[in-house]
Amino acid sequence: MKTINKLLLLTVLLFGITTYAQAQQEPPIIYGVMVDEDVKPIVGVSIYYDYKGKRETATTNKNGVYRLELPANEAVDVYFAHHDFKLSVIEGVQLKYGDKFRFDSQMFSTLDVLVIDNTNKREAEGLVAIQPDMVAHIAAATNDISAILKTFGSTNNNNELSTGYNVRGGNYDENLVYVNDIEVYRPFLIRSGQQEGLSFTNTAMVKNIAFSAGGFQSRFGDKLSSVLDITYRKPTDFGAALEATFLGGSLTLEGASKNKKWTGIVGARYRDNSLLVNSQDTETNFKPTFADIQSYVTFTPNDKWEFSFLGNVSQNKYHYQPLYRQTNFGTVDDPQALIIYYDGQEKDEYKTYFGALTSEYKVSPDFRLKLIGSLYHTQEQEHFDILGQYLLGEVDNNLGSETAGQVQFPRGVGSQLNHARNNLDALIANVELKGYYEIAKNAFEGGIKFTREDFRDRLYEWEVIDSAGFSINPPFIDAPNDQPYSPYNGPLVPFQNVRALNYVTINRLSGYLQWSRRDALSSGDTLYYNLGVRAHQWQVQQETGPDGKSQVVFSPRAQFAVKPNWNSNMLFRLSGGFYYQPPFYRELRDQNGVVQPDVKAQRSIHLVAAHEYGFTLGGNENANGKVSPSKKFKLVTELYYKDMDDVNTYTLENVRIRYRANNDATAYAYGLDMRLNGEFVPGTDSWISFGYMKTEENINNRGYIARPTDQRLKFGLLFQDYMPAIENLKMYLNLVYNTGLPGGSPSYADSYAYQSRLNDYRRADAGFSYVFAGPQVTKSDAKWLQPFKELSVGLEIFNLFNNLNSITNTWVRDVYTKNQYGIPNYLTTRVFSLKLLARI
């Protein structure tokens, strides 16, 4: 018996050792169950990872169960992809031989934040989330986040060449833009959308995008209209992305150290707008080039500290030599044409350098501090000498005539010479300390910031207008001119003449404090509220003129939101407060280029009432017993009112803003914004938006007139689709309709006498692409596609219906009647481009 017992014991030990040894050689496994928002199993979820150029994939069965083997002792990102749900990822999964890791998860609709969740604060804060992937795929001339914003009812821009936008009656200077809590800036001297090529934000590096059109919290800075909050991502492994079109391209590389303490992402972009600009009605020798390099590096030495660096270097060159232009306008019965022959050229350059260092320290799990230092340097020049000799007249509309389409009866002949030697050098330094503290249901946040702005600016530009051989004086020259019957003895001066030399320093000290809390009431309702206040002190100092006085403003702000118990898919929100905009350098310069150091901060009182409602359509059984697929939607409605005083009025020439710098007006804006987004096509996220707005200003108590951005009606559509039979074939449609803006007025004219409007703005851009590899298409077995996380080739059609849109007027004098005609400056026509997207 002893011998038998020893044999049994030896057998058990050998079996255990063998089993243990086999277990040590078995690959690790991740497994689990995937369910939807209603906790129902999801069939066909693709679970995969990429490792050393090889992709391994598993799929959930009818019970939502999956099982996937992983490489041992290697950190990999595990992705969960399905047509009808948002892509999910577990970053840095690292298991040993024999390990089994269970991961059960819910997947949510491709509609972002459809079901309003207690743990998600964005809806309560009035922030709209935008998917970065949507920015990369949308067909738009700018290929920028602004292209998405322009489809919202609250956001307008009638110039497809510009990345600027105005929100609810504001202008391009009234919008805050943050990247990783760091405020970024736009060039100062840009006067035309043609001169804009690249915005600061590199969309290939973006992780999260949030946007608020008004009523935002105190933690955001001092601007009147909106805030765009962008977060760059921290990579976990090597990756590369390439985008190439006829308009330029970008290359992005990213990676992380083996211990994940160092991460880095760098992107290089190049853009050439010649394809778009050469489609305009002005014949030119035009070669605009824009390029930049941007990097984001992080270092996490331990659980307490994190350091990061954000840097950007960009150079924009705008060389423009107009040759000839013919613009036809008028009516069928009275056709008119403007013909201009040009001589001369324009050479503009913008060089910007930006760097920011951030250090974050976690004092405790509930308390952290962040220190941010940034430096922005821009060198800009605007040099041009352009002579335009014009002929204005009636067009021969007789189709049988040999001169059909040509100017037959001249009504105005003249010339216009524009000259400028403008240079600007600006250095802006910021140091900011922020603190975040949470206790129970309360969250406290505060910060203090010091900013020093140093500007060296030379303005030297003039314009001479000659009509039928006689130089035209500006209206303020009251000298009799009866040529050719009697000699002219008055002064000879340019029609416009701006000469200024400004050396300005602005010191600013600002800070904020806010408190947030979320409560579950006994009734079952969920209540969220935020209270905060900002303070801002500044003083303008000059080397070439008198210093300004020290000024201080305070901005209390509040937000309240409730999610009722009787409908968990509904949210009510009320927000508002005082929003001051202390003058930036450009707002200090009057129309003659002279700095007015005591310009006050513009003030706007916001009041925003919002309602959000998520609902589902479909899912019903028809007469044949088939169940239609359910489609999920979200309707957001916002009513707003803005009361403004100490308004710094301005004129808008294309995208250049010229302020009067005298705080001589009051204004208001009110309107309605609506946006319905959801699964118009199953598995895609699309939306349609509507906006109504009215904004007027009262200058020196003369009565209310339309502001330059008074855009009454707005319709926007962003639509995604794919062919069910060929799921890899995708379509993106971006459509915008705006009623006409005020057409502006000639130089020195009284704006109250010119209240005509431009024609309506209609724009449709479409993109068609075939996706060879991507998170929401079936994985191909082709070996050459294995390294790609995404690969697509497409066709883009800009201005699909070839609409003639105008952004401004060129004012031309009629010799006989002395009237001035507003000749529309038309934008781009239909343009075709190819697009390649690749990501590994």
Image (tube, rainbow, N blue to C red):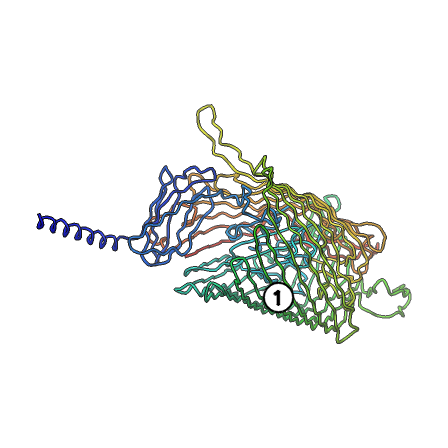
Which residue appears farthest toward the top when viewing the image?
623
Q: Does any portion of residue 690 appear in the rendered image?
A: no
Callout 1, which amino acid?
A: Glu
738, 399: nearer the viewer: 738
The location of residue 406, given as percent across then percent down, is 70, 52
Residue at point 47% right, 61% down?
252
Q: Is residue 619 above or below residue 735?
A: above
State whether residue 294 is above or below residue 700.
below
Q: Position of residue 175 (x, y in %)?
A: 66, 57
Question: In this view of the protein, can residue 764 be seen by the observer?
Answer: yes
* In this rendering, position of residue 130 left or right of residue 837: right
Secondary structure found at label 1 = strand
Camera-side residue of 403 and 225: 225
Image spot of residue 589 (x, y percent): 75, 66
Q: Residues within 10 Å of mark 1 (few under 14, many from 20)?
A: some
| Quarter that holds the C terminus | bottom left
- Does 214 sit above or below residue 291? above
Query: Which residue corresponds to mark 1?
Result: 432
Q: Position of residue 278 (x, y in %)?
A: 60, 58
Quadrant for residue 271, please give it: bottom right
Instruction: Give the total number of marks visible in the rendering.
Output: 1
Where 286 sits versus 116, above or below? below
Q: Residue furthest front?
A: 2
Choose between 361 and 568: the one closer to the eye.
361
- Judging depth in this view, the residue of 390 and 498 nearest the camera is 498
